[in-house]
């Protein structure tokens, strides 16, 4: 009987837990997950507060990767509910349907603005017939796709709020978020001449009825049921190396240093953190490109309201700069049982950089600005507010600047010199994706390792695969 190999997985968010789930099911490995936090799930976890089960912002289970959504549903079983998707865009004092509808656009924007957008698109379309150069930025990509007026009205301000200066962003951000590269396809769907598909619009999605955190919780249960170990509150102190391999991982657990041998090391922790751990004591040269990779911090402001429900949507996007938040989300739209019968909570989310003033703004000021914005949009009266909560998360979104690919290639080329190292997940691979993509990464890695593929070969193939990932709202 072949001896099982030791696998250490860094991080127990959905990416790490899914990795453990597939490896444990194969029966070929001793699997240990090391998580710095006292709980698993990362930002996909749920938590309780004032009688509510709350998520870290808006999450859903949906996938256009063949077979993955079915596998997730089979895994979760009766712990999921199926919901029709309801989300819109708040613009100029009105709610726009999403996907966009011609009649709704005309009514909300008015004839003059609608005509301006249409002419802008036609100008962009005709230019595109002769200008075939690849777009160099998010701005160029979206302008070519929708025209300058639509870009200036909706896509530019929203991108500035979520990602930063669109002229300095790589077009990959747009390609990941916009489910088409063809402006005519969008126009045909807008006019009703072409139907939406599951690749362009999620008409429904699944959600764990106990809160989104039940998704990583189920993965945790499966890992432990199949012999895997999950150690929380574990701070990685050192990676022991020998002959170009990581031989063991040292971590501080309950005040003492423990050592975990590994034949394979799979990391879902931030790529920048892993790079610092690997490139110490002269094992590899530190790559300055790793420290140049940009991230966006996340701020969540929860506003508790003395009303059963406020919205008719699960979440609403706010591109206009007069609102501090870029999106609001109502937890009880997922499942009314996740909070008290006569109360609800709106989660306002927005992102920023470390150096931005908003990151250093006091919680009370952020809360007040969110309440003011919700009142201005007509959703609440300040007298209805009965509480609030503010949460902050550093380095939540990888932020693709225009040279991010070159930086990633330099960092990965360095790390691939470690023979038994693999990366996975949003932060681990510096790849903007959702939890279904993390599930897919884990299955892909597991299947290839089970067949005896070398880690660096698996890594290179995975890099190609993740380029096809798309996020469908």
Image: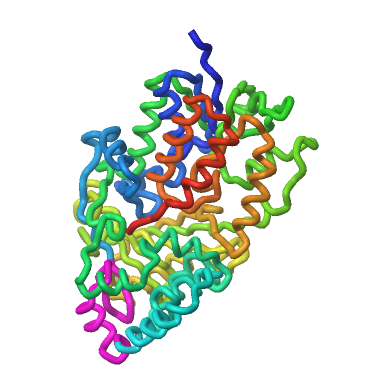
Residue 343 visible at all: no
At a point 51% along the width and 31% down the height, the residue shown is: 232
Asked whether, in this view, residue 115 is left or right of residue 348, the answer is left
The front one of 133 and 45 is 133
Indicate the position of residue 130 as horizontal and vertical percent values.
47, 79
At a point 41% along the width and 56% down the height, the residue shown is: 389
Indicate the position of residue 82 as horizontal and vertical percent values.
21, 47
Q: Is residue 440 magenta?
A: no
Outermost residue on the front side: it is 130
Residue 466 visible at all: yes
Indicate the position of residue 353 as horizontal and vertical percent values.
57, 63
Asked whether, in this view, residue 216 is left or right of residue 76, the answer is right
For the magenta stretch, what is the residue range? 88-114
Outermost residue on the top side: it is 1
Indicate the position of residue 445 as horizontal and vertical percent values.
48, 34
Quarter of the image for residue 307 reads bottom left
Q: Is residue 102 magenta?
A: yes
At a point 43% along the width and 42% down the height, the residue shown is: 438
Outermost residue on the right side: it is 282
At a point 32% along the width and 44% down the height, the residue shown is: 66
């Amino acid at each position: 009987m072949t001896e099982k190999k030791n696998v250490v997985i860094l991080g127990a968010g959905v990416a790490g837990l899914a990795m453990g789930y597939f490896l444990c099911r194969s029966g070929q490995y001793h699997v240990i997950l090391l998580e710095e936090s006292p709980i698993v799930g990362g930002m996909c976890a749920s938590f309780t507060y004032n009688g509510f089960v709350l998520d870290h912002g808006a999450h859903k289970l949906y996938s256009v990767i063949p077979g993955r959504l079915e596998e997730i549903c089979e895994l979760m079983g009766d712990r999921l509910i199926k919901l029709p998707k309801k989300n819109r865009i708040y613009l100029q004092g009105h709610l726009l349907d999403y996907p966009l509808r011609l009649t709704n656009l005309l009514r909300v924007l008015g004839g003059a603005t609608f005509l301006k957008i249409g002419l802008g698109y036609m100008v962009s379309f005709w230019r595109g017939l002769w200008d075939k150069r690849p777009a160099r930025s998010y701005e160029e990509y979206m302008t070519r796709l929708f025209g300058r007026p639509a870009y200036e009205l909706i896509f530019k301000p929203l991108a500035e709020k979520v990602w930063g200066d669109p002229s300095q962003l790589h077009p990959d951000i747009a390609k990941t978020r916009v489910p088409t590269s063809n402006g005519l396809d969008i126009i045909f769907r807008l006019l009703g001449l072409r139907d939406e598909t599951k690749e362009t619009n999620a008409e429904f999605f699944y959600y764990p009825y106990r809160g989104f955190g039940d998704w990583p919780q189920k993965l945790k249960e499966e890992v432990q049921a199949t012999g895997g170990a999950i150690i929380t509150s574990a701070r990685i102190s050192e990676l022991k190396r020998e002959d170009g391999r990581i031989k063991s991982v040292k971590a501080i657990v309950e005040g003492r240093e423990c050592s975990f041998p590994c034949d394979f090391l799979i990391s879902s922790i931030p790529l920048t953190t892993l790079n610092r751990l690997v490139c110490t004591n002269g094992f590899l040269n530190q790559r300055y490109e790793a420290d140049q990779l940009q991230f966006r911090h996340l701020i969540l402001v929860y506003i508790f309201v003395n009303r059963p429900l406020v919205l008719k949507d699960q979440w609403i996007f706010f591109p206009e700069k007069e609102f501090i938040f870029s999106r609001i989300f109502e937890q009880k739209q997922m499942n009314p049982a996740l909070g008290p019968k006569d109360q609800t909570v709106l989660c306002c989310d927005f992102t920023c950089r470390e150096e931005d003033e908003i990151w250093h703004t006091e919680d009370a000021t952020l809360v007040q600005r969110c309440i003011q914005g919700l009142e201005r949009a007509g959703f609440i009266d300040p007298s209805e507010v009965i509480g609030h909560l503010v949460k902050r998360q550093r380095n939540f979104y990888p932020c693709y600047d225009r040279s991010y690919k070159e930086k990633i290639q330099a960092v990965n080329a360095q790390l691939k010199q470690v023979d038994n190292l693999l990366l996975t997940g949003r932060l681990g691979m510096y790849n903007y994706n959702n939890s279904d993509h993390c599930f897919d990464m884990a299955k892909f890695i597991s299947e290839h390792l089970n067949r005896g593929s070398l880690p660096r070969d698996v890594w290179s193939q995975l890099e190609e695969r993740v380029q096809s990932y798309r996020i469908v709202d």
